Amino acid sequence: MNTSTSILERSNVTISGATGPNKQTIVFLHGLGGDQSMWRLLVPAFEAEYQVVLLDLIGAGKSDLSAYSPNTHGTLDGHATDLLGVMSALALHDTIFVGHSVSAMIGVLAAVREPQRFAKMVLISPSPRFLNENSYAGGFEQKDINELLAAMEGDYLGWSHGFAPVMMGQNERPELVMELTNSFVRTNPEIAKHFARVTFFSDTRAELGFLTIPTLVVQSAHDVIAPLAVGHYINEQLADSRMVVIETGGHCPHLSAPQETLSAIDKFLNRDTVLG
């Protein structure tokens, strides 16, 4: 097995869509508790025009769980290195990146390190800092995070059933809540708990000023995980950014409001294709 193949298999990379030397690539990276299947409602709209690359964060989905290291993945930088490794193995440049939640910030870290690999960024429900701090409103107090992590430690299954509805914010769509719950349950509990700690205590605000790539921030109107103020903060900090607010609840507009999310991305990419 050559190195490139092992990198792609480690992250469970799947490739679909258009091929050819002039076809641009779009990379999708999921958030906490999910896997690449979370993009199923968006991907078909891009496959005619783009080469589509999906991958699982190391430790999630069908990735190589043995490759997850508390040291390497003790910060988001380790996941940014994994993403750049996949992009290098596929020789990707001028790529469109779409990241959800914590993976939006993983993408930012990667793009700051190797900007030549990225043409445009789409950050869905991003948060550079979940904790409130001075004038910054991240949405959580320290005690909130401590209680959340303690609940995971004490009863991971029960936490999964309780947190998924909060994250999805769609009481009228119980099938989406169940899908997210099942995704949490499928995740290795020890990895999930470690990654949650890394996620909720991360602080990537300082990196935002170094990102010069054109960026779209997609924000749910009613998101308790990454409140509207966080989206406005990111939009204001970036050099070349625009923000679209989707009238939906929860932290996953690509699932709860896929058509509206597709429309926002479509306009940002200046595509002529009408989304069906």
Image: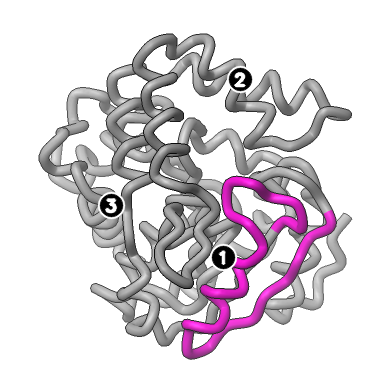
Nearer the N terminus, badge 2 or badge 3? 3
Could you say where residue 75 lies in the image, as x and y percent from the top left? 22, 49
Mark 2 and mark 3: span between their CA atoms?
25 Å
The answer, for residue 75, to whether it is visible in the render is yes
Tag 3: amino acid: Leu
Mark nearest the camera among 2 and 3 is: 2
> Which residue type does callout 1 highlight?
Val
Name the residue beneath numbered marker 3.
76
Residue 187 point in image, percent of width and height: 42, 20
Give the residue pinned by disc 1: 230
Q: Earlier in the sequence, mark 1 or mark 3?
A: 3
Q: Residue at x 29, y 19 (%)?
A: 190
Seen in the picture, residue 205 relative to 260 is either above or below; the reply is below
- Element carrying mark 2: helix
Residue toward you, 155 or 25: 155
| Stretch of the chain drawn in magenta | 220-247
Q: Position of residue 210 (x, y in %)?
A: 33, 83
**Whether residue 86 can be seen here:** no
On-image quarter of the N terminus: top left
Please identify the residue farthest to the bottom as the structure is shown: 239
**What is the quadrant of residue 213 in the picture?**
bottom left
In the picture, measured across the screen, residue 39 lies left or right of residue 41, that is: left
Above or below for 28 versus 66: below
